[in-house]
Amino acid sequence: MPDMLVRLYDLPDSRPQLEALLDEGITVRPALAPERHLVIEFVRQHFQSSWISETEVTFGKTPVTCLIACQQNQILGFACYDAIKNNFFGPTGVDPAWRGKGIGAALLLATLECQREQGYGYAIIGGAGPTEFYQKTVDAQIIEGSEPGVYRGMLRD
């Protein structure tokens, strides 16, 4: 999977997606340090094991570089940045039962806005799986020759 580049100075406004989710009782917000164990368990239940390690890294940063989508006391999705490398977006994922409701797009936009607020002009989506989604949502462009990129030589279980 290739890396993709996003122009942070040209992002679509996240407010319509976030407000639509709020109407359904779903909030998107930065995760809090005391929620680390809950977020890690969510990642463990739904996604590949390497994402656990990347997500754990984000809780050692100030501020925490992981956002979550939740409804009441249930995590529905998460998105991280500055996990594998500075200025990288990911990993990210939505509970399969909640996909198709705009949660992934809202998490993507809110997380990229956090990166922009930290002073970045561009963000890199590392090992982008659904490239069409990223192209459509934030006009991300594939970085030629980026596969396997920073994941080259990574040990796998």
Image (cartoon, rainbow, N blue to C red):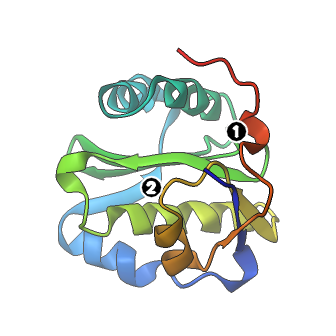
Secondary structure beneath label 2: strand
Q: Is residue 26 left or right of residue 92?
A: left
Outermost residue to the top: 157
The x and y percentages for residue 20 are 27, 78
Q: Is residue 50 left or right of residue 103?
A: right
In the rendered image, the vertical position of residue 138 relative to residue 34, given as above or below: below
Res. 154 image quadrant: top right
Secondary structure beneath label 1: loop
Between disc 1 and disc 2, whose residue precedes? 2
Q: Residues within 10 Å of mark 1 (few under 14, many from 20)?
A: few
In the rendered image, the vertical position of residue 85 relative to residue 119, given as above or below: above
Q: Amino acid at mark 2?
A: Arg
Res. 64 image quadrant: top right
Between 132 and 107, the one nearer to me in the picture: 132
The x and y percentages for residue 109 are 52, 69
Q: Residue at x 81, y 65 (%)?
A: 120
Q: Which mark is residue 62?
A: 1
The x and y percentages for residue 21 are 27, 70
Q: Is residue 92 left or right of residue 20?
A: right
The reply to whether residue 117 is visible in this rendering is no
Q: Residue at x 76, y 64 (%)?
A: 143
Q: Which mark is residue 29?
A: 2
